[in-house]
Amino acid sequence: MVYTNLFFGMDIIWWFIWLIMLVWIFLVPYDIPGQRNKKERPLDILQKRFARGAIDLKEYQRNKAVLEKDATQ
């Protein structure tokens, strides 16, 4: 049997495997669930600020009402 060393010593299936791996690493979008940071909604940010104590209850309720009103429109 004559082996002509095609594909630089690798079978063609290995080239496809390497190509798929490279595409997966470099071209897959960054917003894969569970892999990257999720984008926070404005209400989430407001809740975190309230939990930290950066804003008081009145300001929280006022901003929450505005955000909920904007979300329904």
Image (spheres, helix red, strand yellow):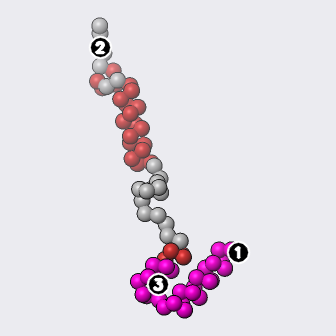
The mark lying in front, picked from 2 and 3, is 3
Q: Report the magenta stretch's main SS.
A: helix
Residue type at mark 1 is: Gln
Q: Residues within 10 Å of mark 1 (few under 14, many from 20)?
A: few
Mark 2 and mark 3: Cα distance apart in space? 70 Å
Relative to 50, does residue 5 appear above or below in the rendering? above
Please tell me how crowded label 3 is: few (under 14), some (14-19), or many (20+) other residues with Cα within 10 Å.
Answer: some
Pointer 3 residue: 50
The residue located at (43%, 56%) in the rendering is 34
The quadrant where residue 14 appears: top left
Residue 31 screen position, x and y as percent: 47, 57
Q: Quadrant of the N terminus?
A: top left
- What SS does tag 3 mark? helix
* In this rendering, the label closer to the viewer, 1 or 2: 1
Residues in magenta, as a range? 46-73
Closest to the observer, 41 or 19: 41
- Please name the residue that numbered disc 2 is placed on: 3
Q: Is residue 21 above or below residue 4?
A: below
Q: Is residue 61 magenta?
A: yes
Q: Quadrant of residue 3?
A: top left
Instruction: Please check the rendered image and state whether residue 51 is part of the magenta-colored stretch, yes or no.
Output: yes
Q: Which-is-in-front pick, marks 3 and 1?
A: 3
Q: Which residue is mark 1?
A: 73
